Image (cartoon, grey):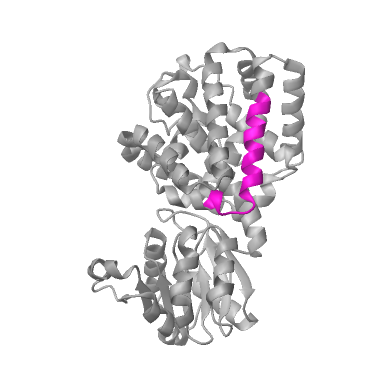
């Protein structure tokens, strides 16, 4: 971690944030609490009065628009959705102070960098960043990517001092490396959870009442799906649709689901088992002495939304997990190498995949259920259809279609979001503590 900023820097350097959504507010409050005396923020002009009231007497300066923030600030963070970044930078970028550092908090860097290159003056530095966690998660110990696209060594060191107050794990990448890794750690992971949610919605089934979706691994699936569906759709749409690397990975996941399902319904055991074993060996065969990401069934069992007795638990094919490991194998992708850009949700996803494949009894039960348990076959068919539907929506770049699919699924579960949010937060705090330790 770089040295902290000096008192002189905190007194004189002005920090600016354009876009005061949840992450913008987290950044503003964290920076000000760390001693930066001049934090300038704004949102859309029509939100000025509301924002002024919210931050009255905090010491944070609310400005009317991004022109004022850009003209005065030495470090400027655009905290806006990826689909709007070009328009917002086009509007306020020309007002950027000479020699200032400009960053963005979008989850997809290709459109952000394109907007910066197109609309910012040549005499400003482009050193962008990305905190890989949501606004309700403590940044301590979480990955924070810094991308020095066009900045001096002196300005890069200043950015590191500014961001040191988050106590995050700094990773330096190019924007192309960032997007390639986050396509896996975020876009495909979210698609898998969304496909599960859409499956349950089409089945008109709440999984916490179903013996097939009871137990440690299932608690992760259910709670992380609820966490995603309770958030804003555009965050996930931007990650999937605007990331140039995401479409190929999302397509392969859909293909892996379909390929495995076809083997299942034909009960081609030898071919199915050979494909699963090859994928497992590729992903987990060389993990060495790496500590397991998750702990035990007894721990994960604490985080249930339902009350199905353990003795009534039924086998699950875990098609979603088998297909993800197969997807990594087909793409020759090592998910452990992507931990530099891990999110809590990706850590859970890799953790339950690891948990399944490294427990021979669990894996055998899943294989037998996948091939021969007709009770789970209906859900698996719906899951394959849901995964293909999400993949086609992403391939077409259809933001409106993504929104409609997301909101339709979200409405079905909305009555349980409050309880799920509490349990999901507890789960993330548990795995975050394990990561930091």
Magenta-drawn stretch contains 360: no
Please tell me which residue is depicted at 50% across the width and 53% down the height of the picture. 238
Q: Position of residue 283 (x, y in %)?
A: 72, 39
The foreground one among 172 and 245 is: 245
Question: Where 178 sits versus 193, above or below?
Answer: below
Question: Where 159 sits versus 263, above or below?
Answer: below
Q: Quadrant of the N terminus?
A: bottom right
Please tell me which residue is depicted at 41% across the width and 35% down the height of the picture. 409
Please tell me which residue is depicted at 43% across the width and 40% down the height of the picture. 406
Magenta range: 239-260
State the predominant SS element of the stretch in magenta. Answer: helix
Magenta-drawn stretch contains 245: yes
The foreground one among 436 and 116 is: 116
Q: Is residue 402 visible?
A: yes
Q: Is residue 232 left or right of residue 300?
A: left
Residue 71: quarter of image:
bottom left
Q: Is residue 275 left or right of residue 151?
A: right
Please tell me which residue is depicted at 61% across the width and 68% down the height of the picture. 147
Question: Where 280 sits versus 240, above or below?
Answer: above
Residue 118: quarter of image:
bottom right
Residue 111: quarter of image:
bottom right
Number of numbered callouts drawn? 0
Q: Position of residue 273 (x, y in %)?
A: 73, 22
The foreground one among 329 and 281 is: 329
Q: Position of residue 34 (x, y in %)?
A: 41, 73
Q: Position of residue 322 (x, y in %)?
A: 64, 30
């Amino acid at each position: 971690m770089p040295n902290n900023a000096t008192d002189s820097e905190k007194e004189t350097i002005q920090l600016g944030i354009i876009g005061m959504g949840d992450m913008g507010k987290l950044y503003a409050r964290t920076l000000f609490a760390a001693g930066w005396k001049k934090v300038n923020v704004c949102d859309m002009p029509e939100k000025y009065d509301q924002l002024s009231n919210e931050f009255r007497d905090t010491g944070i300066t609310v400005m009317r628009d991004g022109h004022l923030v850009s003209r005065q600030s030495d470090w400027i963070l655009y905290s806006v959705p990826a689909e709007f970044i070009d328009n917002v930078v086009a509007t306020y970028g020309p007002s950027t102070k000479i020699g200032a550092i400009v960053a963005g908090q979008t989850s997809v860097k290709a459109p952000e960098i394109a907007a910066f290159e197109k609309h910012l003056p040549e005499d400003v530095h482009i050193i962008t960043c990305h905190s890989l966690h949501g606004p309700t998660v403590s940044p301590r110990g979480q990955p924070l990517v810094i991308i020095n696209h066009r900045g001096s060594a002196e300005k890069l060191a200043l950015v590191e001092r500014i961001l040191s107050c988050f106590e995050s794990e700094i990773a330096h990448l190019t924007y192309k490396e960032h997007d390639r890794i986050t396509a896996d750690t975020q876009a495909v992971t979210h698609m898998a959870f969304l496909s599960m949610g859409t499956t349950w919605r089409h089945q008109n089934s709440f999984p916490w009442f179903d013996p097939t979706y009871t137990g440690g691994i299932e608690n992760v699936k259910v709670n992380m799906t609820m966490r995603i569906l309770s958030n804003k759709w555009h965050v996930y749409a931007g990650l999937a649709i605007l990331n140039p690397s995401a479409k190929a990975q999302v397509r392969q996941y859909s293909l892996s689901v379909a390929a495995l399902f076809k083997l299942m319904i034909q009960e081609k055991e030898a071919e199915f088992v050979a494909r699963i074993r090859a994928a497992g060996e590729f992903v987990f065969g060389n993990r060495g002495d790496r500590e397991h990401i998750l702990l035990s069934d007894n721990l994960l069992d604490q985080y249930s939304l339902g009350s199905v007795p353990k003795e009534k638990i039924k086998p699950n094919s875990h098609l979603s997990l088998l297909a993800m490991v197969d997807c990594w194998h087909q793409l020759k992708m090592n998910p452990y190498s992507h931990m530099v850009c891990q999110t809590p949700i990706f850590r859970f996803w890799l953790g339950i995949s690891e948990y399944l494949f490294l427990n021979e009894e669990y894996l055998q039960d899943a294989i037998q259920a996948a091939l021969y348990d007709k009770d789970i076959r209906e859900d698996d068919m719906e899951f394959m259809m849901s995964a293909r539907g999400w993949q086609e929506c992403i391939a077409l770049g259809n933001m409106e279609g993504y929104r409609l699919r997301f909101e339709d699924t979200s409405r079905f579960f909305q009555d349980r979001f409050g309880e799920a949010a509490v349990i999901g937060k507890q789960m993330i705090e548990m795995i975050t503590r394990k990561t930091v330790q």
